[in-house]
Image (cartoon, helix red, strand yellow):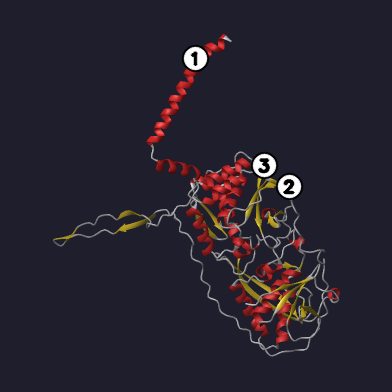
Amino acid sequence: MQQNKDGEPKLFRLLGHFSIVLLLSASALSAQSFEEFKRSQAESFTKYKDERDNAFNQYLKQQWEAYNVYKGTPLYEKPKPREIPPAEPVKIKSVGPKVSIQVKKVIHVEPKPVQKFIIFKEPEVKVKVVEPQKEIVKKEVITPKKKEVEIVKVEPKKVEVVSKDISFNFYGTPLGFDVPTGIKSAKFYPQSQEGITNFFDSAASSEYENFLGEIKRVSNEMNLNDWGIYLLVLDISNSVHSNQDNSNLLSWFIFNKLGYAVKIGLAQRHIILMHYSKKIIYATPNYNFSDKKFYVVSNYNKGSVGRLYSYKQNYPGATKPLDLALNTLPNLTSKMKKKTLSFEDFGKTYNVSFEYNQNLIDFMATYPQADYETYFNAPIDSRTYQSVASDLKKYVDGKKAGDAMNFVLHFVQKSFKYERDNQQFGREKVMFANETLYFDKSDCEDRAVLFSYLVKELFGVSVVGVKYKDHMATALYVPMSGDSVKAGQRKLIVADPTYINASIGQSMPKYKSLIPESFVLVKKD
């Protein structure tokens, strides 16, 4: 008890000192203007330039929920036929007016460089031989001096200097970007939900506006669709961060700022990037958020990533789905190559030669498995189409329409070896028409895509893809006889690009009595 009494004076002395400190602090505060105080308080709550980031960062700190994965939907209910026996060649009755194919000549203009770079060259060294001069004095010849060799160092011309923090080759086009310090230094640490908010805090506090503006400018100038932008952002993120978790977080930040509905999740202490898509992306694991599917595109055909933890609310204003439609082709640097296809029809051999851009083929090879409308409605590169159409024109001009269309059908049937995707690629892969021309082997839907594009462009006829559980053909809206299908109120004549030797109006026996599972709409230009 005595100790407590003795301690009281000491306690009061301490409280007295503390009161003096509070009084001094209050005096200092009263000396500060009210406006300065408000400004300092506002700055503490608005460290981000974008007001959305304050609320979103607080939201990220809330409790996350567990989500179960859904396996990707397969394209076909049944495996496609291992082999397709050919039909017996039959000459059909010629119908329709004589055709004359119109092939528009396309003058290709190589895309301008979207960025300037420093080109370092070694200084040129030129050797200048100085011839001796004869000097004449009072008509006496003076012995000339010996030849002299003068070394002249020529400095390279001054080039506009544009240095970039990161640079890489994007399908033949060199690109570079300056990256804000806050984005370069952002780290997923610790490997938890807290680490995600730490990364976001660093990125959102950075001077990212010019960085995003440059991504948008390059995307526009290269005419990139959503898939092209997806690849561009991934290349940028991987160039900035070698750690995959940091790279995924940077992609997430960029996509959200570009307006795409993108989420991240935590699975086994690693970052999972998920894209919202209205249409099915086949063979790709996905998660449901309020009845919207978010796909782990990086795991296309690689299996499930399992259960993960994530959040419900999207980044404010980020609502755009990932749309894989390829309505126009990207402006890629040309890397042109040539190929010739040969086929035999009624005892005669025909050759069709064309050129193609290898950079475009490489771009298309990255595609995950999109819906069929994406492939049936994508254009062929103008130079490729022009060369193919010009060779076909030599063979079909002057023929009746029925014969001309059958010739193109036989070209697609016989120029490629039939092989299922699993044997050729180890997975299901629908090819764009450009790819079908490029590869030596293809299966039913690949040929249907190519034929539908050619018959639509060359002859101006309406065409649809005809989908069965294990097969794909096409059907034409033409006044011809033979096997047919009914799409809506229209009767369409079957044309099967995989049934070798078959003409328009001949279905494979297996599918004659079957009702198609669905039709693929091919839009007319």
**Mark number displayed over residue 269:** 3
**Mark number displayed over residue 443:** none
User: Which quadrant would the N terminus be assigned to in this image?
Assistant: top right
Q: Give the residue type at disc 1.
A: Pro
Q: Secondary structure at mark 3?
A: loop
Q: Give the residue type at disc 3.
A: Arg
Q: Kindly give the residue lying farthest to the left in the view shown.
A: 138
Q: Residue at x 51, y 68 (%)?
A: 110
Q: From the top left corner, tell me how far across and down residue 113 is, in percent.
A: 48, 63
First reached walking from the N terminus: tag 1 or tag 2:
1
Q: Is residue 157 above or below residue 342?
A: above
Q: Is residue 305 left or right of residue 329?
A: right
Q: Residue at x 59, y 64 (%)?
A: 225
Q: Is residue 257 left or right of residue 135?
A: right
**Mark number displayed over residue 307:** 2
First reached walking from the N terminus: tag 3 or tag 1:
1
Q: From the top left corner, tell me how far across and down residue 480 is, in percent.
A: 76, 86
User: Which quadrant would the C terminus be assigned to in this image?
Assistant: bottom right
Q: From the top left corner, tell me how far across and down residue 237 is, in percent.
A: 57, 51
Q: Is residue 392 left or right of residue 218?
A: right
Q: CA distance from mark 1 to mark 2?
A: 62 Å
Q: Give the residue type at disc 2.
A: Arg
> Residue 481 or 382: which is nearer the viewer?
481
- Between marks 1 and 2 in the image, the one whose residue lies nearer the viewer: 1
Q: Secondary structure at mark 1?
A: helix
Residues at marks 2 and 3 touching, judged by CB atoms closer than 8 Å: no
Q: Residues within 10 Å of mark 2 (few under 14, many from 20)?
A: some
Q: Residues within 10 Å of mark 1 (few under 14, many from 20)?
A: few
Q: Secondary structure at mark 2?
A: loop
Q: Is residue 92 above or below residue 287?
A: below
Residue under label 1, please give it.
9
Which quadrant of the structure image shows residue 193? top right
